[in-house]
């Protein structure tokens, strides 16, 4: 009988407790000598080992962060270039459940080609009817064309005096250092950014604004291809740069830290995202202690990552955003912004924006995600990953400090070089499908319908220095991992529009349906990623019948699909027959050991298999088709 007077109920209490050692012995027996680390452990982009199983740990005290049981702020981007339409967006978003707005300025890297040209009139129009009394949070993402002291003293001051805006409802989120890295912010040389930050802060403080003036924004690093540790090290270094600049302007460190908040990206790597948000709080607490301050909870905002957005099969972006919001919420984010699922197509319409809001509202109101005090309490994986990530980020932060701080490290290219190297690894993993994005490099849907967006041209300004001054150091720019694959799909779409059909490849199936189905399915998925359709798979009675079907398939490309035994029996003969029938490009799925030389001699041009450079193979196919 269960003791109902107990505070806890032990499920399956009649069974003896299982131990990690017992589990490991069972696994080792099943592996039969295979390497445990290679088979079951994985590594993050920073090389952190992720175990297949963690032992439970005693629940540690939670880091101070978002108030337990309190939901995070549901933020919505306001990025329509027309101030009146931006105002419509804001009103609709508030009525739809958003309790915060992010006003996106034109020209900043995060605007992705849209955003407002911020001036007194535009700002007043965009915010008309928006209650800025503390009930709605307002955050700014301003572009490089905005003069921050002028904005603070004039543009926004006009709205302050007219609207009676509550200081605690605003996060200006100025980031001149991050802006300099991503889009060449303004006309301020890097060496003058410290005093510039001080002037902005004192100007806003004189107006009564003393919180959330500057943001340390990790999006510039992560969306350019950086790792979790690189993102954390960058935001720490930027925050410390602002602390020093504010102290130099005569602001106490206690007041200075309240002027700074953080924004991190939220990704589908949910465990790493949770660990990243927790690691940031640990690291910032260490910075505060080093400054002689008693740690206080920092405000940490989140935005779903741009780099994982796909233009094709965009509905999958909704799933990715849901995972990212879940991770950010569990990780303790104070506010979350979801990029609408059609953002890679253009300016999202009302429906896409509604889905972005509701992704969060469902998790808050229906899943009650925010009501759990500490969901990670006692989980070994959380403690282990957060600790490893914090250590890796702290090591990189120290390297930046040894270089002279964030500004000096940017001038030397230290941060940019690391991000560029991480990006190259990411792109390689996408090309070889070690990393997959459904709709981009895996499971492409060639028959998908076009999604609606607001028909307005995006700006095409490339990140770089302001025309008023020369480039001081290399810039990095946000990217989407799907773009190279989308270029192939675009080429296929142009061919369809011009000639009524996409490029096609004939699947030369060997043996019975049971023999060739697995590899034929692999080939269909493989070529569809590049917009290349496959001719329906059939079971052929003979090589002659197979060749006859190829002859009427209206394509010169063919791919052999079958088992290794079928390749040994028929592969060379079928390859020669297809070549003789006019096949100009011949592929084969798999890597039949010992047969490669004979198959190549028979006319096989390319072997496609798990681990192939999918992107390179498909780019070459389009080149041969004359589509590039």
Image (spheres, rainbow, N blue to C red):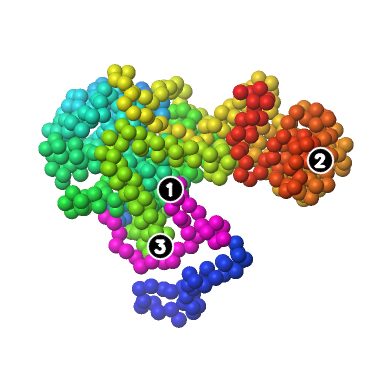
Distance between the alpha carbons at the discs numbered 2 and 1:
45 Å
Q: Which label belongs to residue 46?
A: 1
Q: Main secondary structure of the magenta part?
A: loop
Mark positioned earlier in the residue sequence (3 or 2) = 3
User: Dot 2 lies on which element?
Assistant: helix
Q: Nearer the viewer, mark 3 or mark 2?
A: 2
* Mark 3, residue position: 379
User: Dot 1 lies on which element?
Assistant: loop
Residue 27 position in % (x across, y down)? 56, 66
- In the rendered structure, the answer to whether residue 120 lies left or right of residue 502 reads left
Residue 298 position in % (x across, y down)? 25, 47
Query: Residue 57 in magenta?
Result: yes
Tag 3 and tag 2, C-beta contact below 8 Å = no
* Mark 2, residue position: 572
- In the rendered structure, the answer to whether residue 559 lies left or right of residue 406 reads right
Mark positioned earlier in the residue sequence (1 or 3) = 1
Is residue 466 visible in the rendered image? The answer is yes
The quadrant where residue 302 appears: top left
């Amino acid at each position: 009988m269960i003791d109902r007077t107990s505070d806890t109920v032990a499920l399956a209490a009649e069974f003896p407790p299982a131990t990690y050692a017992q589990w490991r012995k069972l696994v080792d027996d099943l592996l039969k000598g295979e390497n445990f680390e290679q088979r079951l452990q994985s590594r993050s982009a920073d090389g952190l080992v992720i175990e297949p199983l963690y032992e439970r740990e005693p629940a540690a005290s939670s880091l101070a962060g978002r108030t337990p049981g309190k939901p995070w702020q549901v933020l919505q981007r306001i990025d329509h270039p027309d101030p009146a339409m931006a105002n419509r967006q804001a009103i609709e978003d508030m009525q739809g459940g958003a309790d915060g707005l992010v006003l996106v300025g034109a020209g900043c890297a995060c605007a992705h080609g849209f955003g407002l040209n911020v001036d007194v009139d535009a700002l007043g129009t965009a915010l008309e009817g928006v209650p800025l009394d503390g009930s709605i949070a307002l955050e700014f993402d301003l572009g490089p064309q905005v003069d921050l002291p002028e904005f603070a003293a004039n543009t926004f001051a006009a709205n302050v005096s007219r609207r009676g805006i509550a200081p605690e409802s605003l996060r200006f989120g100025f980031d001149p250092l991050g802006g300099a890295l991503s889009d060449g912010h303004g006309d301020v040389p890097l060496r003058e950014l410290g005093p510039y930050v001080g002037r902005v802060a004192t100007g806003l403080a004189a107006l009564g604004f003393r919180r959330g003036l500057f943001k340390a924004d990790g999006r510039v690093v992560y969306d350019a291809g950086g790792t979790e540790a690189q993102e954390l090290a960058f935001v720490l270094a930027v925050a410390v740069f602002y602390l020093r600049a504010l102290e130099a302007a005569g602001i106490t460190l206690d007041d200075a830290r309240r002027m700074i908040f953080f924004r991190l990206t939220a990704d589908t790597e949910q465990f790493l995202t949770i660990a990243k948000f927790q690691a940031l709080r640990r690291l910032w607490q260490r910075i505060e202690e080093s400054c002689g301050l008693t740690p206080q909870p920092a405000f940490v905002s989140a935005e779903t990552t741009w780099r994982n957005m796909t233009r094709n099969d965009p509905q999958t972006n909704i799933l990715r955003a849901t995972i990212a919001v879940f991770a950010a919420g569990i990780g303790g984010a104070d506010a979350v912004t979801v990029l609408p699922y059609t953002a890679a197509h253009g300016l999202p319409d009302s429906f896409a924006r509604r889905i972005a809001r509701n992704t969060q509202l469902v998790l808050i109101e229906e899943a009650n995600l925010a009501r759990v005090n500490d969901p990670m309490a006692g989980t070994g994986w959380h403690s282990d990953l957060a600790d490893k990530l914090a250590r890796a980020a702290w090591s990189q932060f120290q390297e930046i400090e040894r270089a002279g701080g964030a500004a000096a490290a940017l001038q030397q290219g230290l941060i940019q070089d690391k991000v560029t190297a991480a990006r190259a690894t990411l792109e390689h993993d996408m090309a070889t499908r070690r990393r997959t994005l459904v709709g981009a490099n895996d499971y492409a849907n060639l028959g998908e319908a076009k999604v609606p967006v607001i028909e307005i041209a995006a700006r095409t300004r490339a990140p770089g220095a302001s025309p008023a001054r020369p480039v001081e150091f290399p810039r990095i720019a946000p990217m989407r991992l799907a773009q190279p694959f989308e270029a192939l799909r675009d080429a296929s779409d142009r061919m369809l529009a011009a000639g009524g059909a996409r490029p096609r490849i004939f699947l030369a199936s060997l043996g019975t349906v049971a023999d060739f189905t697995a590899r034929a399915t692999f080939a269909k998925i493989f070529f569809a990623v590049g917009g290349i359709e496959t001719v329906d798979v059939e079971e052929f009675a003979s090589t002659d019948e197979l060749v006859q079907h190829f002859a009427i398939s209206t394509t010169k490309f063919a791919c052999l699909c079958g088992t290794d035994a079928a390749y040994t029996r028929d592969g060379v003969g079928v390859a020669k027959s297809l070549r003789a029938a006019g096949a100009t490009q011949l592929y084969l799925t798999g890597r039949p050991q010992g047969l490669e030389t004979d198959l190549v001699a028979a006319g096989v041009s390319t072997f496609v298999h798990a681990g192939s450079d999918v992107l390179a193979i498909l780019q070459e196919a389009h080149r041969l088709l004359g589509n590039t």
